[in-house]
């Protein structure tokens, strides 16, 4: 491993999925950075077991989605079930995305892909290096880092990003609070091999069984495994094979197959917290360091990777002088509401799932079955769970129009992305040169069927409409557009 640099533009603390995704993006953008992690390598275990469409779209911009998709299983949707009948099904098939499914893949496999991808592009993770402390060193910070041999190194960085998980040292040093609750919710997790495939038409779905005995979730995993999650009383330990069979017998459908083998087990204690702020001067928080919540809905790691996607291009734009430092303030403005909304949403899902008592449980199930009939409900849920409905419009000046909603994601079916470039989509009718071309960090796409020019950010969100079709004029004003300003 190369020695730890003493100076860098961006120090990334933590090489979990979020730190690795950020490192991959910064490598692709050519931003000088250093990644440290106190562990020797990606941690074993499934943990987060699904990549949502919105995350896959971003990982596709990093050139990673194809390999991930080749290894994972495609889950076609989510279901709420009462053990006898499906109450509500949320299919992903109709989502307007190249990835209309939840990619079921262990977090360990996801991290290994990210790690390999980074290494293949010349990136390095300094493993066994632990952040001890940092202090202000205008305009950035100087951090002290303990090497595997115990020697303490100093690293001066313009920016520090804490991707160091729920017990974030970066968050503590920066003095950022982590308010919230630790509800009495404990889940037992088991990755198992079943004796036969589960019955039914939608066997690739992740299914929540809502029973008065407690909540049970089943989900297929890559490699022929099945993830079982069950709510358990506080103080319970990791489940054994017979525990898992009891959960299935008491809460699942009568015809669910038996468990042949338990491959991995653990428990997960829920905390619902959002960092008071996602940045403090040159320090940023991303992933679990910034938010943690119930695993219901498989959102946590996905949101963290998209934090990285939001921050990476902004760091690049500011460090290359394309945009003023003020752009980095929009990280808080855009991602903090996403984190708060996420914690509220997963808390509602968990609250609904954990309703106690036979009568209340039956009432809940009836309400869910009725809600499933309401037009648009399952489509809305699919976009929400798939993380395709994120909207940064509230902080932007541009008004939404029916056709083009500034601050929202632009589907690849409307304008295909090109890595982490800005995309200037120009109507063919505008009379400019035919065919795609590139100027600096802007790729120009000439497209049929557009009624106006669209400018799309490197993370796939619409920055502006009706901008000049001239890429050099756009390139010269990118800083303004990055800030969401139209004038
Ligand atoms: C049992 C379990 C089940 C889960 N199930 C789900 C699920 O079903 N769905 C879901 O979305 N999420 C789930 N999660 C949560 C998911 O694992 C996290 O959201 C995800 O790991 C967050 O990634 P991260 O990169 O932010 O942090 P982490 O994965 O925690 O990575 C942080 C990294 O920072 C490093 N680090 C920490 N401190 C320092 C330091 N001082 N110096 C250097 N390095 C440091 C650590 O070694 C680690 O590698 C589960 C978690 C667990 C434990």
Image: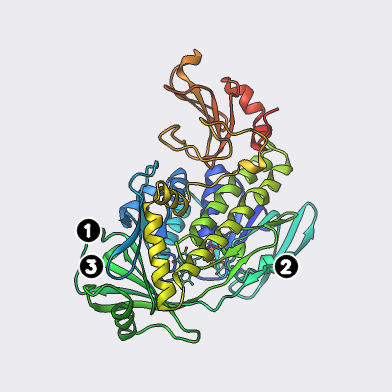
User: In this orientation, does residue 432 appear?
Assistant: no
Label 1 secondary element: loop
x then y, percent, for residue 38 = 57, 70
Residue designated by label 2: 173
Q: Nearer the viewer, mark 2 or mark 1?
A: 1
- What scheme was used to colour the molecule? rainbow
Q: Earlier in the sequence, mark 2 or mark 3?
A: 2
Separation of disc 3 and disc 1 at Cα?
A: 9 Å
User: In this orientation, does residue 409 appear?
Assistant: yes
Please report contact status of discs 2 and 1: CB closer than 8 Å, yes or no. no
Residue designated by label 1: 201
Question: In the image, is residue 246 above or below residue 281?
Answer: below
Label 3 secondary element: loop
Circle 1 crowding by C-alpha within 10 Å: few under 14, some 14–19, many from 20: few
At horizontal 58% and vertical 67% (from top left) the residue drawn is 165
At horizontal 46% and vertical 58% (from top left) the residue drawn is 115
x then y, percent, for residue 42 = 46, 66
Between 270 and 317, the one lying in front of the other is: 270
Residue designated by label 3: 198
Q: Nearer the viewer, mark 3 or mark 1?
A: 1
Q: Is mark 2 within 8 Å of ligand 1?
A: no
Question: In the image, is residue 445 above or below residue 52?
Answer: above
Taking the image as shown, residue 4 lies to the left or right of residue 390, namely: right
Q: Quadrant of residue 46?
A: bottom left
Between 144 and 402, the one lying in front of the other is: 402
Taking the image as shown, residue 135 lies to the left or right of residue 264, namely: right
At horizontal 57% and vertical 75% (from top left) the residue drawn is 183
Residue 352: mark in rendering: none
Circle 2 crowding by C-alpha within 10 Å: few under 14, some 14–19, many from 20: few
């Amino acid at each position: 491993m190369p020695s730890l640099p003493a100076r860098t533009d961006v120090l990334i603390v933590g090489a979990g999925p979020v730190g690795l995704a950020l490192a991959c993006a910064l490598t692709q953008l050519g931003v000088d950075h250093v990644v440290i992690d106190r562990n020797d390598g990606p941690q074993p275990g499934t943990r987060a077991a699904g990549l949502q469409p919105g995350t896959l779209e971003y990982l596709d911009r990093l050139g990673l989605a194809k390999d991930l998709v080749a290894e994972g299983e495609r889950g076609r949707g989510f279901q709420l079930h009462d053990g006898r009948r499906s109450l509500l099904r949320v299919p992903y098939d109709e989502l307007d995305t190249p990835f209309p499914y939840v990619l079921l893949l262990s977090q360990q496999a996801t991290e290994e892909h990210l790690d390999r991808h980074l290494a293949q592009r010349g990136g390095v993770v300094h493993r066994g290096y632990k952040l001890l402390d940092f202090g202000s060193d205008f305009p950035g910070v100087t951090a002290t880092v303990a090497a595997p041999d115990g020697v303490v190194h100093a690293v001066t960085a313009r920016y520090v990003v804490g991707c160091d998980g729920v017990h974030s040292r970066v968050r503590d040093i920066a003095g950022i609070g982590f308010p919230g609750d630790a509800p009495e919710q404990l889940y037992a997790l088991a990755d198992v091999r079943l004796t036969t495939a589960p019955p039914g038409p939608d066997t690739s779905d992740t299914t929540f069984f809502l029973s008065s005995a407690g909540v049970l979730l089943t989900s297929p995993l890559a490699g022929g495994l099945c993830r079982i999650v069950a709510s358990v009383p506080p103080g319970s330990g990791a489940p054994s094979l017979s525990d898992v069979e009891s959960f299935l017998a008491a809460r699942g459908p009568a015809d669910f197959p038996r468990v042949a083998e338990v491959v991995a087990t653990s428990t997960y204690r829920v905390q619902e917290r959002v960092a008071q702020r996602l940045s403090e001067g040159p320090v940023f928080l991303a992933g679990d360091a910034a938010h943690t919540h119930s695993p219901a809905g498989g959102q946590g790691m996905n949101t963290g990777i998209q934090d990285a996607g939001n921050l990476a291009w902004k760091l690049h734009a500011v460090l290359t002088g394309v945009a003023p430092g003020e752009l980095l303030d929009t990280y808080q403005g855009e991602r903090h509401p996403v984190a708060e909304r996420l914690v509220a949403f997963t808390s509602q899902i968990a609250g609904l799932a954990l309703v106690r008592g036979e009568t209340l449980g039956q009432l809940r199930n009836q309400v869910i079955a009725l809600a499933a009939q309401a037009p648009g409900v399952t489509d809305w849920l699919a976009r929400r769970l798939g993380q395709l409905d994120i909207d940064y419009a509230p902080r932007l000046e541009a008004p939404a129009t029916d056709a083009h909603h500034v601050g929202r994601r632009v589907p690849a079916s409307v304008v295909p992305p090109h890595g982490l470039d800005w995309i200037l989509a120009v109507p063919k009718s505008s009379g400019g040169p035919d065919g795609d071309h590139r100027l600096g960090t802007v790729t120009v796409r000439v497209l049929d069927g557009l009624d106006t020019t669209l400018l799309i950010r490197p993370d796939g969100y619409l920055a502006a409409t009706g901008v000049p079709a001239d890429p050099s004029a756009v390139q010269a004003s990118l800083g303004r557009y990055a800030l969401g300003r139209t004038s």
